[in-house]
Amino acid sequence: MTNDALTRPGGTARADRLLDRNHDTGGAKVKSTRWRALLRKPETSSFIILCLAVVFFTLANDRFLSPLNLANLLAFLPELGIIALGMTLLLTAGEFDLSVGAVFAFCPVISMLLVQHAGIDLGLALIVGFALTAVIGLANGLFVTKIGISSFLVTLAMLLLVRGSTLFATQGFPLASFSGETILKPLLAGSFYVGEVRFHASIIWFALLAALAFYVLNYSKVGNWISAIGSNRNAAIARGVPADAVKIGLFIATSLLAALAGTISALRISSASPVAGDQYELEVIAMVVVGGTALTGGRGTIIGTIIGVFLLRIIRNGIVLVGVPGLAFNIFVGGLILVMLVVHAAMQKRSSRA
Amino acid sequence: MMREVLRLENVAKSFGSVQALRDVSLTVNTGEVVALLGDNGAGKSTLIKAISGLHGIDRGRIIVDGKEVTIRNPRDAMNLGIETIHQDSSLAVDLSIARNLFLGREPVKAAFLGPLAPLDLPQLKRQASDLLRRVGIRKNLDADAPIKALSGGERQSIAISRAMQFFAKIIILDEPTNNLGVEETHGVLRFIKEVRDAGHSVIYITHNIHHVFQVADRIVVMRQGTVVADIKAEGTSILEVEAIITGADLHELEVDARRS
Ligand SMILES: Nc1ncnc2c1ncn2[C@@H]1O[C@H](COP(=O)(O)OP(=O)(O)OP(=O)(O)O)[C@@H](O)[C@H]1O
Ligand SMILES: [Mg+2]
């Protein structure tokens, strides 16, 4: 990041002087600007609030850091986190997807129905389930890019369509566990112990996918395109960036990640419920924007999203431990989201002029 | 030796009931600066958007280097050696200067990975810094700074340096000196001359006739979607050109000029 004075018009003389000073004091100056740049990043403020939350809950209730509570927290968190990764990329490109919660239930339910009624093997059933999910993502993408309907409307309609189909196909009843031997279960939902804390395989999937998403957004060619499309779509198109194809790909990826999360969840609790993932879309979008990704596109951060995922889960978990009545949860979550957005907006205003 | 690089024949384009271009014919030669003039709404931007692949044409032919081409999208145009700086902002303000400079043509390692290929970030940064220096942006701009932090004029300079870097055959500038200070404006005009001297061609759209006479070899005037004049810059005068643009009587203008 640059020193503000350097880039202001008419600030040249001042800038020159600054440069001289830079020269004199050498490394120290560079270091301090680097620190300031780090402080300005949206991830930093989210991270500070995350730390405060952890300290607060630890002091408020010593069960917060108990192995059992940590295991609970980490069992559930990656399932939302995996969806949030796709949502981050999509938001960075300037679109979002409200159908992820419905897809979360749809994929395992359809796969399970196939196993139970068509008698096919679970692996094959999941392939069909994921293929149908990809079609949902493709449809979202095509409606948004080729017909030009806003992603809010398209994915809202898709949410109702997919959730409705899932409910209708199951008549509203959850489907019993995936029985029988399959390597998929330990692979996707197995668990292991580190010390006294029980971890699920999903945390590893989340970590791997987060690393991939981080690479894609920050270091790959298509990541540059994603940010450019969200920042100024016409400019990106004028440079030959295939904006529509990128967006369609992101819609498909987001749907697939939601389906993966749903499948992991269904395997973990041995039940595929048609109402699973209800309102996850909002929770996930909240996680992403709390982490510092702009709802308006152009600026996305995977690190921020990971922080946001932890922050919202920890707050939900901690509030229970502190003894806040269940019905009052959302007051805190809503309040926190507002506070975070205000902080991000304030930082954003300070660091730029546009 | 002058050779024809671009020829348009009877190009037409409508937006619904608005006929933005009708029967536009135009040629551009190597090493030539063509100034494209005309009042607001004359169709200049529409014409260059057609050449740069932002929208198709309804009728007519586009010939590049003697071959008829179809320009379906900006990438087609770029591959034909046509680089454009559009009138409306052509930068992604959330991205860094370096990333903007190479948007759509990012240097990568492991290119076989396609869109997932890793950006060659050191190379990106080095080339960007070189470029900023070469274009004569003397202010100490950090290639990692986001465009958002730049002034309007600085942004314009970045857009122009981007068009320079790929040694395009034809560089199109749509009102590039808007928002620019005196020094930056001279930089742009100097850049146009350099490009011409290097044998490339420039289509230069502007409302500033004084600038036109400093750099243009030929002047093409559009009015209501069609070309109404195509004249050598040498041997014509500002008044004459103004008259053609507005469609006014040259004599009246001369009287006006003498009165004021
Ligand atoms: N996308 C569009 N949809 C509808 N009409 C358009 C569109 N683009 C341009 N036009 C119309 O076409 C005509 C030509 O516009 P154009 O932008 O080419 O003018 P211009 O010569 O570049 O003017 P200026 O000097 O103001 O930039 C105008 O009447 C404009 O309203
Ligand atoms: Mg124009």
Image (cartoon, coloured by chain):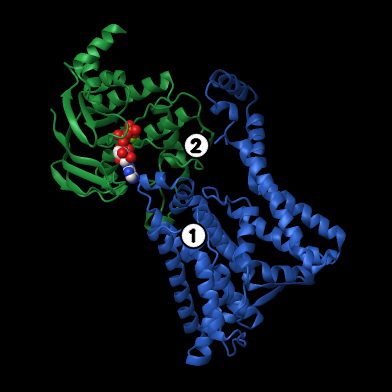
Chain colours: A blue, B green
Residue occupying image coordinates x 64% and y 79%: A268
| Amino acid type of the residue tagged 2 in the rendering | Ile
Residue B78 location (% of width, % of height): 29, 44
Q: What distance separates the C-alpha of mark 2 from that of mark 1?
A: 27 Å
Q: Position of residue B147 (x, y in %)?
A: 50, 37
Q: In percent of the image, x 45 and y 36: which residue is there?
A: B126
Quadrant field for ligand 1: top left
Amino acid type at mark 1: Ser
Is residue B182 shown above or below A315? above
What chain letter is assigned to the residue under label 2?
B
For disc 1, the marked residue is: A151
Asked whether mark 2 lies closer than 8 Å to ligand 2, one says no
Residue A84 lies in quadrant: bottom right
Q: Which chain letter goes with mark 1?
A: A
User: For the C terminus of chain B, which image quadrant?
Assistant: top left
Say left or right for B24 vs B96: left
Q: Residue B158 bears which disc, if any?
A: none
Q: Position of residue B235 (x, y in %)?
A: 16, 16
Q: Nearer the viewer, residue B202 or A193?
A: B202
**Residue B93 falls left or right of residue A351:** left
Farthest-out residue, top: B259
Do we see residue B200 in this rendering?
no
Residue B202 x %, y %: 26, 31
Image mark for residue B147: 2
* Lateral position of residue A256 relative to residue B55, left or right: right
Mark 2 element type: helix
Eyeballing the image, is B123 above or below A49? above
